[in-house]
Image (cartoon, grey):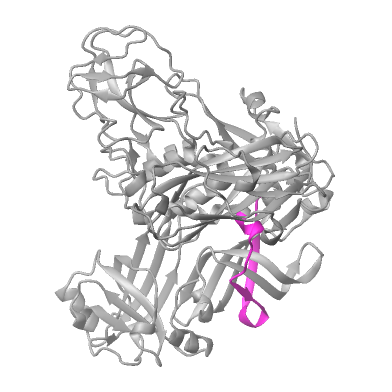
Amino acid sequence: MKTTSTNYNTYNLANSKPVWIAIFTDLPASSGKHCSASFLSMDANFQRTIIGLNYHSISIDRLEPSTDLNNEYEIIFQDQDLAFTQAMTDDNIFGRSVTIKLGFAEIAETDFLTLPTLTVTDVELLSDMLSWRVRAQGALFNLNQKIFRGLPQTLLNGDIVTGAATINVDSTTGFRDPTSPALPTYIKACVLIDGELKSYTGLTGTSFTGCATIGDTGDVDHFDNAVVKQAFAFCCDSLTAALHVLMTTDAGANGFYDLQIAGFGFGISANSVNYPSIEKLGYKIFNIEEFSDLSATGTAYLFAFQEEDGLQWLEENCLGPGICYLFVNSSGLLDVDAVDQFWDLENWSAIKTLSNDEIFSASFNFDSVVNWIETHYKRSPINSSYAKRLQLELDDSVSEYGRTATPFVYRLAGNPFADTLLNAGTPRHFYWARRIFNSYGDITGRIKFETSYKNLVLDVNDRIEITFDNLPELTAGTRGWTSKKAIVTGISIDFAGLVTIEADTHELFTRLDQLSGSNWSVSEVLQANIDDTAVAYSTDKTITIEAADAYFDNTADSFDADLVVFFVEVAEQATGAVTDALLGLRAQVFYSGNIITQDDKNYVHFNPQGSATLSIPIYLWVTNAPTSIITAKLDWFYRSESAPDDQPVITLKKLWFVTFNRDMSIS
C-alpha cells in the first residue's frame, strides 16, 4: 500500500474532490508547475492548466513475470492563456521528467500522494488548437543487455600436458587475479582452453598457477597458441550465483555480492535490487538446486565463459527451477517477492477488503490452468552435455478440472535425465512440483473492477479480499463473492478519480480440492510449545548436544510429515564490527535418536551493525522417514569470521509438520 499522510487519509475518506499536480523537472518554476485546481498554501508559480489525466501503473503477470514493465501518464493541458505554449517555447520538455501528485483542495502539496516520476515521450496539439496532450512513460528497468562482456583472452605459450599445474601464456593482462580482491571460495577464476575448464589460484604476467581441471570437462593435452579465455565457475547454489551477477559492477561498489569483474554483471546499483527477498525465497525453495559450497571438491554446475543475454542466462541457469523469475516491483526494484506463491497461501493477510459499496462494476476472465512446470537438470554447457529443461505435466483429469478422480501424474517429456531427477534419492523436485500444482492447478481468474480514487492507495502486489454480491460464484453455482483472495496486478486512474484495479485470484474454482479433499494438512507447533527456542552458536557446525540447541521433542505424539518448516528469527544486535556477515542454519529431524534428514542454509546474510529482525523459513523435505518424526532441531554457525559482538540472537519461532493429502505418480 502506498504511503500517505494523515491529512491525505482524512480527506480521501471524506470523498473530497481530487486535485492534480504536474511538476516538470529542471524547468523554471514559472513554467514547470501545473495543477487542475487551487489547493491549500498553493505556490504562486502553479498554472491551472490541467484539464485531463490518466495514469496506468505496471501490470504484472504473476506466473510469467517480466522486467519489461512501464508506468504511463497521459496529461491534457489547456493552453488558452499560452502558459503551456510559453513553457514549450522557452524550454524543451521532451525527455524531461514529470512527477504527478494527487491531493485535495483542503491540504498542502506536502500532503499530496506522489505517483512515480516518468519521462515525457510525446507531445501533441489537439484539434481544438487550445489543448496539448503530453504522454510520459517510465521503464522501471532496461535489462536487455549482455553479461560476461569483454572477458579477456590470450594464447598458450608452449604446450601443456595432462595435470599441468602451471599454464604459460603470452599475457595475463585483463584476467582476474582471484586473490586481489579475493573471490569467495565458491567462485573459481578459470581459463577455458579447447573446451576444458581449468581453475587457477594465482597469476603472474605470463602464467596461471595452481591450475586444476574443474566441472568434469576433461583433463587433456593442449598445444602452443591454443586460445585461452577467461571463465568463471560457480561452486555454489544457483541463487547466490544469480545475486553475484546482478550486483557486480565495473566499479566494484555493490558490497558483498560484487565480484569486481569488469563487464561481468548488469552494472546496476545495490539499492536497485531487492536481494533480501530473493535470498528469502531461496531459503525456502532452492533446496531443489542447492549445492552449497562445493569448492573443496572442484565441482561446479554454472559457468561464465562467453557473452550471454543477461536475463535469458539468469532465467535458464539460476531462477527458473523455482518458478522464480526476476521482475520489477512497484517500487522499481528487481524482485521476486510477488512470485513467491507459497507465501500467498501460508501467510495470507489482506491489506484491504473491497465490498459492495466500493465496487462500481466488475468483470473477469479465465487464464489457462497451471498444468505443466519446467525445471532444470544441469550439465556442463562447455562439453555440450547440457540439458536445459525438464517439463513436468499433469494428467487430463486436472486440466479438465476434475472430470475424473485420477490423481496427479507426472508426464516426462522425453528427458534423458528423468530417472536421475525423480528417483528415490532425489525426490525434492517431486515434492516441489506437487506443491505448486496443488496451490495453483486451478484456473486463474483475472478480475478487473472499478472503484473510487480512495483505493488508489493500493499498490501492485497488495493482497486484497473481494466481497461483491453480483459476481457469479462458480464453486457453488450461485451468485455473490465472499472474501475471495486476490493479488493486485495493475492500477489505473482517470481525471475524475475513477480507479480501475486489475487482480488475480485462484479461488474461482476448487475442483482440485474436490479430487481428494484439501491439498495438505498442517500440524502447527507454536513457540510456547517448543522445548527450547533459543538457538545456540555451534563452534563445530554440528548438532551434538540437544540441550545446547533449539529443539522440539514430541515422544508422546509423533508426526508423519512430507515436509517440516522451521520458522526462524534472526535479530541483529547493532553491536558488531562489520556491516556484512554470513551465518549458516542447519535443520534436522530425528526418529528414535537417528537423523532422518537434514538441510543447511549456508548463505544467510545479516548486518552485525544493524537492528533488523529477519524472518527465515527453512523447508526440510522428509523423503525417507522410517516411521514418524519425534524430534526436530535447529543449529547455527558462522560462515564468515566474526567477533563475538557480531552474534545475532536466533530464535525458533514455530514449526509446521506438513502432510500432502494427494498422491502423485510418475508415468
> Which residue is painted at 34% across and 91% down in the image?
38
Is there any visible trace of residue 308 in the rendered image? yes
Q: Is residue 193 left or right of residue 589?
A: left
Work out whether residue 368 or residue 81 is closer to the camera in this orientation and state it. 368
Q: Is residue 11 left or right of residue 163?
A: right
Corner quadrant of residue 135: bottom left
Work out whether residue 84 or residue 393 is closer to the camera in this orientation and state it. 393
Q: Position of residue 538 (x, y in %)?
A: 53, 43
Corner quadrant of residue 430: top right
Corner quadrant of residue 213: top left
Q: Position of residue 543 (x, y in %)?
A: 60, 39
Quadrant occupied by the C terminus? top right
> Which residues lie in the magenta part?
343-368
Q: How many marks?
A: 0
Q: Is residue 371 magenta?
A: no
Vertical comparison of 570 with 49: above or below: above
Q: Is residue 251 left or right of residue 353?
A: left
Work out whether residue 416 or residue 660 is closer to the camera in this orientation and state it. 660
Q: Position of residue 104 (x, y in %)?
A: 42, 88
Vertical comparison of 227 with 444: above or below: above
> Which residue is painted at 69% across and 27% down in the image?
423
Residue lying farthest left?
A: 90
Q: Is residue 290 left or right of residue 588?
A: left
Q: Is residue 344 magenta?
A: yes
Is there any visible trace of residue 324 in the rendered image? no
Q: Position of residue 527 (x, y in %)?
A: 66, 59
> Which residue is painted at 44% across and 22% down in the image?
215
